[in-house]
Amino acid sequence: MASEAYQGRPAFRRGPGSLATGLLVVGALGLAGLAAARYLGLDPDGLLPGAGGLRLAGDFFSRALSPALAYEGSYVVGGPVSVLTDALQAALRTVMFAAAAISLSIVGGSVLGFLATSAWWDQPGVPRRAFPLVTALARGLITLMRSVHELVWAVLLLAALGTGQLVAVIAIAIPYSGTLAKVFSEMVEEAPRDASHALALAGASPLQALCFGGVPRAVPDMLAYTFYRFECALRSSAVMGFFGFPTLGYHISASFENLHYGEVWTHLYVLFGLILLVDAWSGRLRQAVLS
Amino acid sequence: MSRAAEVARLRAERPRRPFVIYSNLTLGGIILASWLFGPFGVSGWLTTARLSGAREFLAEMRPWPLRDQSWNWDVAFGWAADLWQRQGQEALLTTLAISVAAIVLAGCLGFLLALPAARNFAHPRPFLAGGKPAGPVESGLWRSLVWLTRVVLVFLRSVPEYLWAFLLLALLGPSPWPMVLALALHNAGILGKLTAEVIENTDDQATGALRGLGASRWQILLGAIFPLSLPRFLLYFFYRWETCVREATVLGMLGMASLGFWLTQARAGNRYDDMLFFILAGALLVLVGDVVSGVARRIVRRA
């Protein structure tokens, strides 16, 4: 349940033996980690870069404090544009891809979430087993959408539909719709039912009770979560650049492969700035909404 | 008072938060502007060429022994079993191992980084205000430690996993380390932030009482902070493991033998039937991971 870690207020029933269980889990996890490291053949020596890696690390990190402002290559397609201008334009496109994707996800997530929630049939006056088939189908679809990573969706859609900027938007929107649907439906189900019960007792239909009593109680949570997902979409959108879409990731990989590390840092700093800005925004909004 | 006036009064008294309203308007504006001025070209995007391409693609997703033939479950199963044995099995196990190794590393790093980031732990008078106040130099040093750790945490989590892996692969060369470290660093940033919040929210009556009895910072850590924050920490740990499994499936696209690698290989060779197989295998792994994590979280919460 993604909403759980995000909301940060699950109810713990504490009792004797809880620390013992926790320690047992920690021990089991340690063993699992060791087994995984063994399977992968991870040894600490692998953490030391070779001579080539060290030289590259030196070249790369030495530019951290002097990011490039002009292109480092002698020939640049499109004439003499400053790297910073390019990076800011790429950042703008990164925001555009993320915003377009999140808007599709809000629509998809609301529709699917509505179908997946039990809140509108699990109410007084509705036969208990009225809509489980719809709910089960919706939940299955949500799971499938969520289980495939957005980059895999991008590869799949590029193969199926050919190139085009809209592919990246749809690729991000599919798993994000699934996640929003899952979290929205959980939030509506966990929201206090006082208002919807009052409406139902006053004669409202179950659907009316849900729309005017249930959903409004969950809206602040849903809103805060949507902003959080927007921040995630920004990261996904930047990474889409590695697949040729014109977001920040594209410039980072291109500059890196040309060994123009100063340019890489310029793009990296713009990406940090963007993510920090939205992180601070969504954090403040979360506090404002949930207080 | 009439009912209309009562409604009007309630409406006027409803809580309003300008920041929330402006945030919504801003996000709405950004979305509108993106669709209007973005490079998406929505109209005329779904051409007949695209659709016929998609139809061809769907046909090629049929397992190759079954092309132009009627569906036969035995043949399909044989094809899948063969692929599973040749590549699928190892790819799946590698992906799983990467996610487990990464999240365990992230958990250790995250917990260690959470301590200097928690304002009540990293404080000249930990857990109990009062007594002789700390000098300005001492408090300043502690405050800058907290601030510095938080900057590191923000940095770790704001770099996407894929970008970490891309950079680390260039530095460390081909081994599973770049993928494990990429996942571990990003998630250490997230777990560190969440755990610092958990530590700051621990019941200060318990920690304060221990402090009052003369327990040291580290004794309080072991005796109160660790047991009190462990369940919540494990909850976040398993929640982040789910995303680790998801990300581990794609990091292979950079060229390591996890599922993503075989997926891009199949894509490059136009073997769309194999590609679908690896996508479904990845989805299955993610699904199993979600279920395991759900069970684990329920155990932790009941503990």
Image (cartoon, coloured by chain):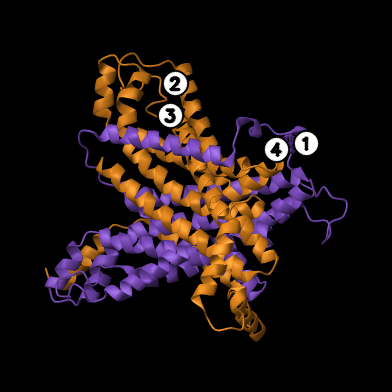
Chain colours: A purple, B orange
User: Which mark lies nearer to you, 3 or 1?
Assistant: 1
Circle on res. B253: none
Q: Residue at x 48, y 42 (%)?
A: B103
In the drawing, does residue A63 fall left or right of residue B213? right
Tell me the CA gap for discs 2 and 3. Answer: 16 Å
Check the image and report above or below for B239 versus A66.
Answer: below
Residue designated by label 4:
A64
Q: Are marks 4 and 2 on the same chain?
A: no
Q: Are marks 1 and 2 in contact (CB under 8 Å)?
A: no
Q: Residue at x 51, y 64 (%)?
A: B280
Q: Chain of mark 3?
A: B
Q: Tell me which residue sits at (41%, 35%) in the image.
A: B196
Q: Is residue B46 above or below residue A14?
A: below
Instruction: Give me the chain letter of mark 2.
Output: B
Q: Which residue is mark 1?
A: A52
Type of amino acid at the residue the image marks with label 3: Leu
Residue under the point 42% across and 64% down: A143
Residue A15 pos. (x, y %): 20, 36
Cα separation between marks 3 and 4: 28 Å
Query: What is the number of the mark on residue B139?
Result: 2
Crowding around mark 1 (Cα neighbors within 10 Å: few <14, some 14 to 19, many 20+) is: few
Residue that label 3 marks:
B115
